[in-house]
């Protein structure tokens, strides 16, 4: 099993931990350990794109 690699991390203005991870060619954005977006699940991106359309 391939491990998750932490590619980048930063703190948001409110002190939250925002990170970018890679696992087996897929990428994941997490906020305080909770997954926000990934290349394996595009639902959030599709919903976000509907707002301006």
Image: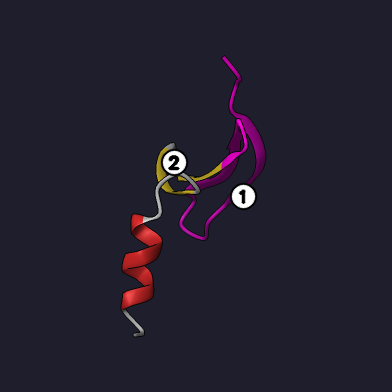
Q: Which residue is mark 1?
A: 10
**Residue 15 sits inside the magenta stretch:** yes
Q: State the mark number for residue 32.
A: 2
Farthest right residue in view: 7
Q: Residue at x 40, y 54 (%)?
A: 42
Residue in front for this viewpoint, 20 or 16: 20
Image coords of residue 8 (percent x, y): 67, 44
Q: Position of residue 16 (x, y in %)?
A: 47, 48
Which range of residues does the magenta coloring cover? 1-26
Left or right: 28 in relation to 50? right
Tag count in the figure? 2
- Answer whether residue 6 is magenta in the image: yes
Tag 2's secondary structure? Answer: loop
> Based on the displayed image, in which of its 4 quarters is residue 7 positioned?
top right
Identify which residue, 7 or 23, lies in the foreground: 23
Residue closest to the far bottom: 53
Q: Quick one: label 1 or label 2, which is nearer the N terminus? A: 1
Name the residue: 56% across, 14% down: 1
Identified at 41% across, 42% down, the residue is 35
Q: Provide residue 52's location: percent of width, then percent of height.
A: 36, 84
């Amino acid at each position: 099993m391939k491990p998750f690699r932490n590619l980048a991390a930063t703190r948001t203005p409110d002190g939250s931990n925002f990170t970018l991870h890679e696992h087996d060619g897929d990428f994941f954005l997490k906020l305080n350990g909770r997954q926000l977006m990934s290349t394996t699940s595009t639902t959030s991106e599709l919903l976000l794109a509907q707002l301006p359309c």
